[in-house]
Amino acid sequence: MHICVIKPSLSSKRTPDALPPLLFAILAPLTPKGVELTFLDENVTAVGDVPCDAAAISIDTFTAKRGYALADGFRARGVPVIIGGMHATFCSDEAGLHADAVVVGEAEDTWPTVVADLQAGSLAARYVSANNADLAAVEFDYSVYEGLRYPPVGIVQFSRGCRFNCEFCSISAFYGKTLRTRPVAAVARSIRQLPRRLIFFADDNLFVDSGRLDDLLDALGRHRRRWVCQISIDVAKDQVLLTRMRKCGCIMAIVGFESLTAGNLRQMHKAVNLAAEYDDAIANIRQAGLMLYGTFVIGYDGDTPDTAGALAAWAKARGLAIANFNPLIPTPGTDLYTRLQAEGRLLFDRWWDDPSYRYGDTAFRPAGMTPGQLADSCRDARYGFYSLRGILSRLRGANAKGLVNIVVFLLMNLVSRRSIHQKQGGRLG
Ligand code: SF4
């Protein structure tokens, strides 16, 4: 049996900022010997009419429409299709219209049954994960990326889940309230398997298990890799920890600042940020010698047409190396989606499948501006922050010390610039 495992892109085009999908490395060891897998990531390679006995397609909300188009094509050729991923989990009935089977939740306890049922010719319509896989038993086979042209970054996972529950985010709805971590020895094994010198942690917050933190940092230091991770802003209170991170190879921390407005932070349930002094956190991160990557979400009720531009100026003044100015997007599975739907503020029935929706458009009615003003202000903030002049003017203040950090700064900024310009205004599907 030959199964194609596919990650669709937004609209069949390749994207410059694609990172290797962990799903591929997870599925390979879960698949019985004798079953051939072909991994196709449309962000780096064309999918085409590849011959196979089944297609497994993983979708998020932005790639759902393209995933459905690919699924319909396979089924028209008589190839059974399985759809999974975050969006299929929250919109399983919708995904079921384009698939023979839908996987709800994680792959570890569902994929082996899917494959066995495919081989027996008795595929079920739904496979529902308990989402409680023991991460100590999860193996990652990084050889699946051979031949696929990704940037030179290795992806490692230490934990799943998040200890917060921001209104606009679906992580907690997907993984539940529990936090799971891999043994540090298993993480070290993953790092050893990766030929890449630069590692990106896929975790939503690397520091979920303070008991294992010392061991994790020791292992990272021993392997002499440079790495980037996401942290919540409370971690940035600890100057000693930040300095130790840098000594153990960390070069950049990603922090979700989201908003400068207390009312917005309350509305998005981001209490951890309300309790933080942003400028102190930034000073600590810089003093430790780390570069800072900040993310912002624009469109909460306290925001106006000036907010995105003001955030971009704030980020520049504080020396952020990278910053995302994301228009607020109601994705299924989030409390935000439920609230805006109840308030009658959604502009589309299903924006991700609507022919008139373009990447960067607003999908709801903001309180402090028009939908067009929200979209335009975020686009302008991104274009300005990532203009060539903007990138060069930020290099000096971005804490990019040493040749490697300067190269990482320039590469990440130039890739972000290309990606922003390529995606903005594009059709989905
Ligand atoms: S936005 Fe970040 S901090 Fe908030 S719930 Fe999602 S992953 Fe956790």
Image (cartoon, rainbow, N blue to C red):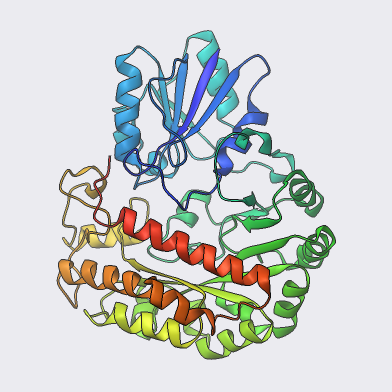
Quadrant location of the C terminus in the rendered image: top left
Q: Is residue 124 left or right of residue 277?
A: left
In percent of the image, x 52 and y 90: which residue is there? 279
Where residue 266 sits: x, y (%)? 38, 78
Quadrant location of the N terminus in the rendered image: top right
Where residue 55 sits: x, y (%)? 45, 23
Q: Is residue 80 left or right of residue 252?
A: left
Instruction: Examine the rendered structure and indicate whether residue 27 appears above or below residue 72.
Output: below
In percent of the image, x 73 and y 46: which residue is there? 195
Q: Is residue 342 left or right of residue 128?
A: left
Q: How many marks?
A: 0
Instruction: Examine the rendered structure and indicate whether residue 100 appears above or below residue 283.
Output: above
* Residue 15 visible (yes or no): yes
Where residue 140 sits: x, y (%)? 68, 39
In percent of the image, x 57 and y 36: which residue is there? 24
Q: Quadrant of residue 143?
A: top right
